[in-house]
Amino acid sequence: MVKTIILDAGPLGLLADTRTIPVVVACKQWANDLLAAGHQLIVPEIADYEVRRELLRMRRTASVALLDQYVTRFVYHGITTAIMRRAAELWAIARQIGQPTAGNNTIDGDIILIALAESLAAPNAVIATTNVGHIARFFPAELWSNITP
């Protein structure tokens, strides 16, 4: 069964990391294994933004170049007006039920990510993240390392 794996900023940031520490190596192997097994990896525009802005702030140009390589290997999914309007609805719902995913004065990237994931309407879709708690309230999410090919 083919899975659609939507990358949150956590695993995407690990993929863009130029270091050879075990967690980075494991994440890169994980992504390669998923691709080899025929699964689809999605880079949401909001995750790309969150990772890219931090890499640019730290002047990590080699990591930005690596991020660009992964973005071209995977499927890039941009933010649309419909996605942002759904995110606004989800943001309001999360607060109405007392389960916000971020502070009231933040843009709340998790909610935008969830709205983007919903828009794919893909069966067997899961958000690969390092922060399952907030996201799994609204969309299937798993710790990236628990998603197997």
Image (cartoon, helix red, strand yellow):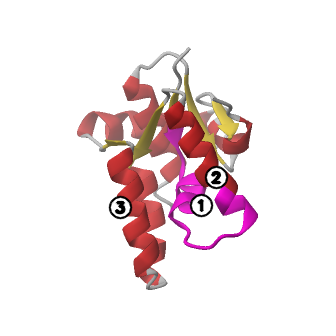
Which residue position holds label 2?
Answer: 27
Image: 7 above or below 89: below
Image quadrant in which the C terminus is located: top right
For the stretch drawn in magenta, the main secondary structure is helix
Q: Position of residue 12 (x, y in %)?
A: 52, 55
Q: Which residue has dot 3 on it?
A: 68
User: Label 3, label 2: how many angstroms apart (C-alpha)?
Assistant: 16 Å
Quarter of the picture holding the N terminus: top right
Secondary structure under the numbered disc 3 in the rendered image: helix
Q: Is residue 61 magenta?
A: no
Q: How many marks?
A: 3
Amino acid carrying mark 2 in the image: Cys
User: If you read the primary sequence from the N terminus, does the residue marked by circle 3 or circle 2 appear first?
Assistant: 2
The residue positioned 38% from the left and 26% from the top of the image is 120
Residue contact at pointers 2 and 1, CB within 8 angstroms: yes
Residue 134 horizontal/vertical position (percent)? 67, 43
**Within the magenta stretch, is there residue 15?**
yes
Depth order, front residue of 31/53? 31
Q: Residues within 10 Å of mark 1 (few under 14, many from 20)?
A: some
Q: Residues within 10 Å of mark 3 (few under 14, many from 20)?
A: some
Q: Label 2, secondary structure: give it.
A: helix
Q: Residue at 32% across / 50% down in the picture?
A: 72
Disc 2 from disc 1: Cα separation: 7 Å
Q: Which residue is mark 1?
A: 14
91 and 71: which is toward the camera: 71
Q: Of 108 and 5, which appears nearest the observer?
A: 5
Query: Could you tell me how far apart the alpha carbons at marks 1 and 3 are, in whole angstroms?
Result: 13 Å
Residue farthest toward the bottom in the current orientation of the protein: 59
